[in-house]
Image: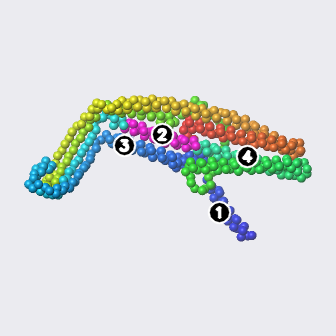
Amino acid sequence: MKILTRGLLLLFCLVLPQIASAKKWTLEECISYALANNISLQKTRINRLSAHEDVLQAKADLWPSLNAQTSQSLVWQPFPETGRYTVNNGTVEASIDKVYYNGSYGLNLNWTVWNGNRNRNQIKADKLIEEQAVLDSAMTANSIQEQIVQLYIQILYSADAIDVYKQSLLTSKKNEERGKVMVEVGKMSRADMAQLSAQRAQDEYNIVAAESTLSNYKRQLKQLLEITDNEEFDVLTPTEMRENALQDIPSMSVVYDRALTHRPEIRSQELAIEQSEVNLSIAKAQGLPTISVTSGIGSNTTSMSDNGWGKQMKNNLNMSAGVTVSVPILDNRQRQTAVNKARLAKESSILELRNQHTQLYSTIENYWLQAVTNQSKYRAALTNTESQQMSYEMLSEQFRLGLKNIIELMNGKTNLLTAQQSELESKYLTLYNIKMLQFYQNGDL
């Protein structure tokens, strides 16, 4: 017996530190961890870096390009004409070589001096795309934060719902035990007793279902945070939940006006309009001349010459430079098509910006209406729960004295449970919608 006691004590000592050190995540910790580890968000950052590379490339295209090239060829003439004179690389040579090689070496420079400012406008367009990539990352981050808040609130609600069901189960068990005594003394029928047992069983089922729902919400939150270990995961219940649910609700117009200044989806669409204007300038430039400069230096060698490689390179050295002006005359309507499509894209972007304003207003209005409605429900639910609690306690006592029947007792318990559930639902819906209004107003959670 002593050995068993010591073993249990040792096991308790080993398990207790793990239980005590189990981490409970705050909302801020969940958001910070997700923003650092979420895979979808990391992909948007990669897209942003890719867009930055396009900007660097567009800037580099303003400068000349320089290419070095060489070619080496081996020639075989099986039946050369004796005493034949061959002109090779500008030199008349007499050769009867059946096998010989030619080599050429050169440096070529190309530079587009002016092309209607298309290259410079392309830099502007790529910079706008880079800014949009940054905003895409911000939109993804906002979406992740909104999902985290929703799951966090659902976890808190489910945990409180389990507590309510557990309290209800304790009451059901007491009623069941009381019913057994009343059956024994002949004050209750077995049919009424069966209803009490059924109510106890229903409460047990409600607890199992609520725990399953809670586990599923935790799983979804862990997935959003990219947590794959088997450690126990739980969230920290904030203090002053009731006070937070009863706080003043921000004005809808204030929230909307502030949201217009910092929401990334609005700024992204404004950039789309700017980008369409730049693309229109690029399209118009297709009808303007293009001026480019080319230059080169090269030499060549051959085995058919008696001169050495160095002397051939010197004797055959040549340099060139030139200017090319290209003026489009007929382009099969390519310029006009590009201009028209750029204008249509601008009109579409303007309409989409209006649509984004409408969607943003509708979203904020929905959060505001839900906050106001559920806060009113919550205030009423607090009073209703208190009244139903007092009513059920009186019914329970009257039932014990034989003044109320089983139907009245069960109805009272059902009314209390419904009131408690309504209170929880309205409280957490109020908290969620107020939190979303604050997020759209300030950008912070």
Q: CA distance from mark 1 to mark 4?
A: 32 Å
Q: Is residue 281 visible?
A: no
* Residue type of the residue flagged with mark 3: Leu
Badge number at residue 370? none
First to last magenta residue range = 123-147
Mark toward the viewer: 1 or 2: 2
Q: Secondary structure at mark 2?
A: helix
Q: CA distance from mark 2 to mark 4?
A: 43 Å
- Along the horizontal axis of the image, is 267 left or right of 81? right
Dots 1, 2 in contact, CB < 8 A: no
Q: Earlier in the sequence, mark 1 or mark 3?
A: 1
Which residue is outermost to the right? 186
* Residue type of the residue flagged with mark 1: Leu
Question: Residue beneath label 4, please?
Answer: 164
The number of numbered badges drawn on the structure is: 4
Mark toward the viewer: 1 or 3: 3
Q: Secondary structure at mark 1?
A: helix
Question: Residue beneath label 3, please?
Answer: 56
* Residue type of the residue flagged with mark 4: Val
Question: Is residue 185 shown in magenta?
Answer: no
Badge number at residue 135? 2
Task: Tell me which residue sits at (73%, 38%) in the image.
Answer: 382
Which of the two residues, 7 or 351, is positioned nearer the viewer here? 351
Q: Earlier in the sequence, mark 2 or mark 4?
A: 2
Q: Earlier in the sequence, mark 1 or mark 2?
A: 1
Q: CA distance from mark 3 to mark 4?
A: 60 Å
Task: Tell me which residue sits at (78%, 38%) in the image.
Answer: 387
Please state the horizontal and vertical placement of residue 177, each as a whole percent of the image.
Answer: 83, 52
